[in-house]
Image: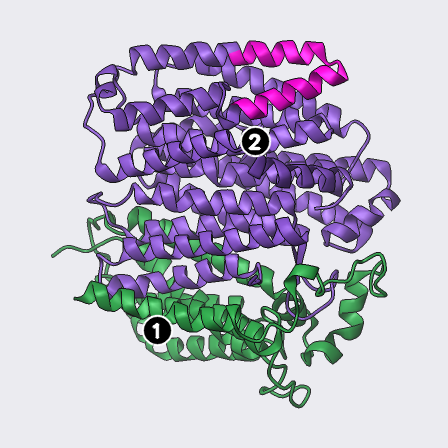
Amino acid sequence: MRKYVAIIISALIFIVLAHFFITGNAPINYLTGGKYTNPITHEQANQSVPQQYLNDSRKDTGAPNVVTAIVVEYRGFDTLGEVTVLFTAATGLALLIEEYRRKMEEIVEPNFIVKIASIVVLPFIVIVGTYIFIHGHLTPGGGFPGGAVIASGFLLLLLVHTTKGLPEKKLSITESFAGMTYALIGLLGLVLANEFLQNYLPLGIFGTVFSAGIIPLIYIAIGFKVGSELGGILHNLKGVHEE
Amino acid sequence: MVSIPPVLLIAFPLFFAFLAPLINMVSKKAVKPYTLFVLLLNTLFASIIFLNVSSGGVIYEQLSGFYPPIGILLSVGYLGAILALLINLLSPIVYISYFGDAKNSVKFSMLYMLVTASSTGIVITGDLFNMFVFFEITAVGSYGLVASMRTKKAFEGAFKYIVLGSVGSAFILLGIATIYGYLKTLNFYDIALRISSMPPTARLMAFIFLIIGIGVEAEIFPLNGWVPDAYEGSSHRVASFLSLGPSKAGIYAIARLLFTLIPIMGGFELALLLGLLTLIIGELAALKQKEIKRMLAYSSIGQMGLILVAFSMDSRMAFVAAIFLMISHAMAKSLLFLGTRNYTVGSLKNPFVSVPIFIGVLSIIGMPPFPGFWGKWYLMVDMASQGFWTIILLVILAAIVEAVYYARFLFKGTGTEKSEGISKSEMTAIVILALLLVLVGLFPQYIYAPAVNAASSFLGGGP
């Protein structure tokens, strides 16, 4: 029964997605290569790419942080790939040690100071991590460092509760949804604005949190994804305590 | 005709690979049909794109809404379309062999989808750094796949692969940094246009860095130490998958480098030398092997060398030959890895196993009317017309060595393992692969026409 439900759900998702791309609004004919102007003739060719990033990034993306503008907007497809590299590594690790996790021989009780301090420090770690990835387009940082900071909070939890693991299932669900959100933001760009990962949201007021189009959305997805992924890796690397 | 944005070849498998853990939570049994469905979907897209390209020429797709070289560009050329179709057609067929297997890990299926998508990405991208990202995904996914057997040999192979692969990645990055430092661009067309303005030493440096990095994935001679161990340690299905996807993408990248990206003085001569060394060392090492998977792995190395020799001839006919050799190698080697897991002469009694294996061997050693024959034939004709008699002699010697060890294998079996019998799904997969080999062999004209287009486009400096 469940098998059929799963197949029907995936087929429905596919039909909805495929509908847009095959019959949907395709004003540009991919056959004739109308999307691409040859660098030889186009005015933007034969110039320094980094110089153009520096000159145009504010106008093009609405993000004060040039690095973010390059990573998420200009070269967003590479970033999707980089997220996938991390995902692949975490998946490979889980494939290898998931069912064969090392048995822990002895339990070392954590220090009293660590125990108490973790309760105080943990909320701040999570807040800092979240702040970093939500403000990725304004301040240095972004989804990857923000997620890593949150994962350090997970590490603290694992150190304090030596006999317990992390909620594996919840992490996995978060990871899946965050990844799908990123891919869907890209696919929506194809539907709403003609190009994969193209910005289809208003740029907003320069320098505020709600600005720069899809950049904050993508960075929030990356933050959740990296945090849950690194958490999953830590969980897998920790030994199993058997009663 | 419908037209499909090529980015879907990458975006859909990524999306569905992210979704796979959720499917696994709903129902564990649904994972395999689901993965097969995703792979078949990609086959459909790849065939539509192939038809579009062969009728209408190169497809360009700009991403993120910025003009290249500011944004990223995908460019599906003739060779890219042929290889994308080849990879996406064969990967579901090899995946069929997993049905009926007791092991049922969703992680494995996810890695399978990701590596398929990223190998496709390498052949359709038009951006140097984007290619590097896809190389990373392919490599990292392959490490996991190779080690997934969890035996000592699997870990040995995977570890060697990781060491060489990481060093290779670093070299690719160095090469990209060199080019970007001088030309301030990452777009293939832009680089090809302005490469001559780079100082010759820097150009040579970038070329060597890139060829070292990509050579690891393409199984080129001094960089292929991981190949025998990784193929021997991994399960026969993973070996089959690795020989159809990542290695083809790697050799495509080398061809792209040679023809359009960094044409340097002596580049083709260097490639010819590397190709001949790879060919001869691979075939001679295969002759000495007793273990069937190691033998096939060394034979793969030899075949990659032959493909590189064909590319380095720098002529239209040899280029067509290289494409046929790639098709033959991808199909026949996947077939042989799948079919010969426990090959003994006794298992010849089953015609559904013995006939496909025989066809695969015939295609690899270049007997008519299989694609391997067309590849070797076109290559010989071309080299004869150019007068490279020494090279012809070497290639023929390598082919004889190849024929010897394959004949030994056919008549003696491997004899090292007990025959467990072959599952129905594996049999289905190898029968389909054998049928494909026969079809391509009997109707080479359908491949020949796009292959000639690919050759003209590459020799003219296009994608």
Which residues are drawn in magenta?
Answer: B373-399
**At x 19% / y 44%, what residue is drawn?**
B102
**At x 57% / y 72%, what residue is drawn?**
A190
> As drawn, is B419 to the left or to the right of B318?
left
Task: Locate residue B278: give its quadrant.
Answer: top right
> As drawn, is B333 to the left or to the right of B276?
left
Amino acid type indicated by mark 2: Phe
Q: Chain of mark 2?
A: B
Amino acid type indicated by mark 1: Ser
Seen in the picture, residue B326 relative to A196 is either above or below; the reply is above
- The residue pinned by badge 2 equals B324
Seen in the picture, residue B417 relative to B156 is either above or below; the reply is above
Q: Is residue B305 visible?
A: no
The stretch drawn in magenta includes residue B394: yes
Mark on residue A118? 1
| Chain that is purple in the image | B
Q: Nearer the viewer, residue B354 or B393?
A: B354
Q: Position of residue B423 (x, y in %)?
A: 22, 35
Farthest residue to the left: give it.
Answer: A243
Q: Label 1's element?
A: helix
**At x 43% / y 69%, what residue is drawn?**
A180
Q: Quote the CA–CA distance across marks 1 and 2.
A: 63 Å
Q: Label 2's element?
A: helix
Seen in the picture, residue A198 relative to B13 is either above or below; the reply is below
> Which quarter of the figure is the N terminus of chain B placed in?
bottom right
**Marks 1 & 2, CB-CB < 8 Å contact:** no
Number of dots carrying numbers: 2
Picture colour for chain A? green
